[in-house]
């Protein structure tokens, strides 16, 4: 199995290192000091499950790699539309693209069925720019339940979690999903193939849509947000509104808000990816989280006043990072 990790940051390098350890032909695409460190020393993974180093091929030029069986996208969703020159050399006729993104994916209504089948979500696929680069037919969804951070160039700190749930937009249990799942399991990662990944998308989003923007606005960790009474209530309300939108789209999460909060609290003093991006002066990945759900609320007629308020404030913050 030949796999390219396009965007070999904290999550991408972790997955690539695990697959490489299991014998897959892995190619890491990165740049800058992180790339230089991976070329010289490999990917160093520091984990409570045991530290290891993987010496996979690393490059900043996908043309050096050529077509692969799977592209694992570790890029932020707000860079998908511009990734055409990077991903094109990696594709052959049947290359699958595994998008490990938070939030609502560009392929969400592809083979969805029902009244919204084929609907394009403007906030995540503006003018069809993402679909033009990443054909929905290639997409395999991926919901990440692992927390990692780049501790330094070439060094990934694995904090917790090893599950990467995957699934087809058309809900089929495809051979390509099963093959990738087996490779991930060989690398000692959990990778269940879900019959309807959209339920997992909403379960993960329940936390991301609330904790991520609030963490950036308050500069707070998961533990701090859960322990502050007022913030905890705002997050609870945001989760209630998000659940209402999911239910309107016939997705059923099957977990209580209090249980979801308890799980987040156990993570401790972890900084969300949005807070990390803010601290590094990077654009904030809010369109696929907040903006997309508000757009879905509009088409389903669900009232989401708290989501709209938090979106307005965090969007202003995001404009500052993009300036």
Image (tube, rainbow, N blue to C red):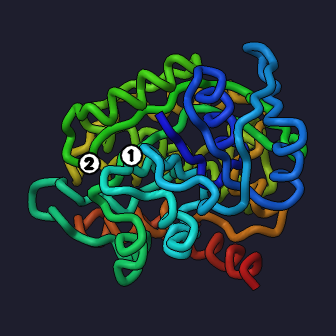
Q: Is residue 237 visible?
A: no
Residue 126, quarter of the rendered image = bottom left
Q: Are marks 2 and 1 in contact (CB under 8 Å)?
A: yes
Front residue (pair 23, 317): 23
Secondary structure beneath dot 2 equals: loop
Residue identified by numbered label 1 = 141
Residue 267 drawn at (x, y percent): 70, 29
Residue 47 in view, yes or no:
yes
Nearest the eye: 317 or 143: 143
SS label for mark 1: strand
Residue 216, quarter of picture: bottom right
Residue 279 on image: x %, y %? 84, 60
Q: Quadrant of the C terminus?
A: bottom right
Q: Residue furthest top?
A: 49
Residue name at image x 78 percent, y 22 percent: 47
Q: Is residue 248 left or right of residue 151?
A: left
Q: Residue at x 56, y 47 (%)?
A: 4
Where is mark 2, residue-wise?
169
Relative to 236, is 151 on the left or the right? right
Query: What residue is drawn where x is 82% and y is 69%?
Result: 281
Tell me residue 168's x, y (percent).
28, 43
Q: Is residue 114 left or right of residue 144?
A: left
Dot 1, how many residues are within 10 Å of its Cα: few (below 14), some (14-19), or many (20+)?
A: many
**Could you say where residue 186 lies in the image, as x and y percent from the top left?**
52, 17
Judged left or right of residue 63, residue 30 is: right
Tell me the distance, in whole angstroms, between the alpha carbons under discs 2 and 1.
7 Å
């Amino acid at each position: 199995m030949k796999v390219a990790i396009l965007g070999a940051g904290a999550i991408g390098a972790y997955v690539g290192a695990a697959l490489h350890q299991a014998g897959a032909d892995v190619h890491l695409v990165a740049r800058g000091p992180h790339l230089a460190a991976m070329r010289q020393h490999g990917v160093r993974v520091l984990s409570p499950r045991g530290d290891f180093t993987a010496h996979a091929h690393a490059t900043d030029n996908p043309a050096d790699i050529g077509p692969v069986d799977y592209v694992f996208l570790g890029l932020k969703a707000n860079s998908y539309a511009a990734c055409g020159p990077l991903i094109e050399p990696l594709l052959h006729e049947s290359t699958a693209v595994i998008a490990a993104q938070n939030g609502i994916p560009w392929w969400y209504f592809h083979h969805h069925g029902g009244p919204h089948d084929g609907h394009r979500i403007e906030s995540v696929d503006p003018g069809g720019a993402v679909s033009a680069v990443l054909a929905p037919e290639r997409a395999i969804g991926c919901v990440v339940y692992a927390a990692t951070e780049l501790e330094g160039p070439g060094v990934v700190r694995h904090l917790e979690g090893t599950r990467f749930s995957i699934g087809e937009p058309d809900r089929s249990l495809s051979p390509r999903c099963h093959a990738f799942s087996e490779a991930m399991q060989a690398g000692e990662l959990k990778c269940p193939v879900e019959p309807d990944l959209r339920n997992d998308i909403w379960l993960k989003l329940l936390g991301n849509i609330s904790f991520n923007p609030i963490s950036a606005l308050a500069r707070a960790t998961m533990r701090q947000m859960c322990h502050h009474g007022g913030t905890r209530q705002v997050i609870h309300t945001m989760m209630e509104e998000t659940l209402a939108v999911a239910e309107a789209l016939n997705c059923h999460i099957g977990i209580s808000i209090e249980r979801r909060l308890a799980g987040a609290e156990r993570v401790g003093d972890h900084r969300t990816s949005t807070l990390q991006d803010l601290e590094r002066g990077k654009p904030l990945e809010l369109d696929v989280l907040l903006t997309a759900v508000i757009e879905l609320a509009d088409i389903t007629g669900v009232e989401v006043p708290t989501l709209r308020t938090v979106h307005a404030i965090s969007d202003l913050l995001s404009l500052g990072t993009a300036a």
